[in-house]
Amino acid sequence: MPEEPYNPSPIGNPSVLARRNWWQTMLVKFIGKHTPKCREMVRIVSQSMDEPMPLIMRIKKRLHFLICCWCQRYEEHLRYIHETARKFPEHADEASDITFPPDAKERIKQKLAGQSR
Amino acid sequence: MSTPDVQAAAARWVDANGECLYRYALVRVRRPEVAEDLVQETFLAGVRGYEKFGGRSSERSWLVGILKNKIVDHFRKLGRETSFTDMEFLSDEFSEKFVSVGFWDHDKGPHEWKPEPDEVMHRAEFWQTMRDCLAKLPQKVRDVFTMREMDDVPSKEISAILSITDSNLWVMLHRARMALRECLEMNWFDKPAGGTA
């Protein structure tokens, strides 16, 4: 087992900051130590979509994203889901092939005709 | 608009939008008779409020907006009768995605997704995948997620409607988003026929 704990920034890490040289390594370690871990960050990312986050947490999130492209992607994906989910109702007819019963349709038409008289 | 005009418009609405409204209502409430009632109430409210419509959006968006409110009212009534916290689902942590110290396991972390939302809007397969992924969520968690993300109800209001605490709501939404993200990645974005094709 290596002496150092799990390396969150392995070789080939595509994040903005990775352990590519001494300075970056120091920076990655510093940010990793002072921002929430990924398991906690995904919870924060979700909550930030439902209520405003304190400024300090928003800064920590941005800093964390510099060293973790996976959490950054996670936030992008949640925003993508948010954007598409709100469009879902208008595309519900494409999402399934269940038929609106014709007799129900007729009943509603008759009711509407009675209502607008 | 005169009465015959409204009657003609109403019949046209049912033909043009009935299918879409019914299918969405059915996804949300799951019981055909309840879905039918909600669709009927939507059209009745549409006829009554037609003067206010004013053509600012498409007829479908307008009717979907009315239906969303009817669905929220339905859950408001339901919320008083049932407990909405799904504890079984809350115990699932997706823990295999993270190493013990709390960082992503890089082999299992989120992949890169393409394309942009606008590009999938016209693909029925995407909406079918989303419906299938939603169907995999436990019922109560799905209700909370759809109310927040599809009906755009503020989180405080959802907590009040369903009589759950804010922190329970956040946990349920977090787990729902995590599960849905995972499902879409596996069944759409990582598939050759899906978004990455």
Image (cartoon, coloured by chain):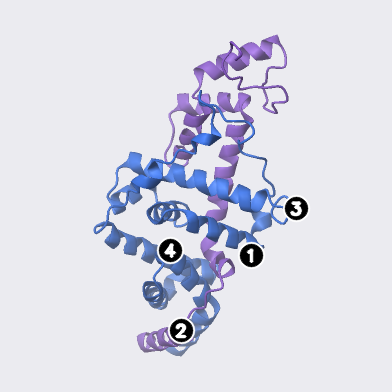
Q: Chain of mark 3?
A: B
Mark 3–mark 4 Cα distance, whole angstroms, equals 31 Å
Mark 4–mark 1 Cα distance, whole angstroms, equals 19 Å
Q: Secondary structure at mark 1?
A: helix
Q: Colour of chain B?
A: blue
Q: Return the disc, 4 or 1, that comes first in the chain's sequence.
A: 4
Q: Return the disc, 1 or 3, that comes first in the chain's sequence.
A: 1
Q: Does residue A87 appear in this view?
A: no
Whole-percent x, y for residue A45 in the image: 50, 36
Front disc: 2 or 4: 4
Mark 1–mark 3 Cα distance, whole angstroms, equals 16 Å
Q: Do dots 1 and 3 share one subunit? A: yes
Q: Which residue is mark 4?
A: B28
Q: Which residue is mark 1?
A: B124
Checking the image for residue B197, the label placed there is: 3
Question: Mark 4 is on which residue type?
Answer: Arg
Q: Secondary structure at mark 4?
A: helix
Q: Which residue is mark 2?
A: A105
Q: Do dots 4 and 1 share one subunit? A: yes
Residue furthest right as drawn: B197
Mark 2–mark 3 Cα distance, whole angstroms, equals 39 Å
Q: Colour of chain A?
A: purple
Question: Mark 1 is on which residue type?
Answer: Ala
Front disc: 2 or 3: 3
Q: Secondary structure at mark 2?
A: helix
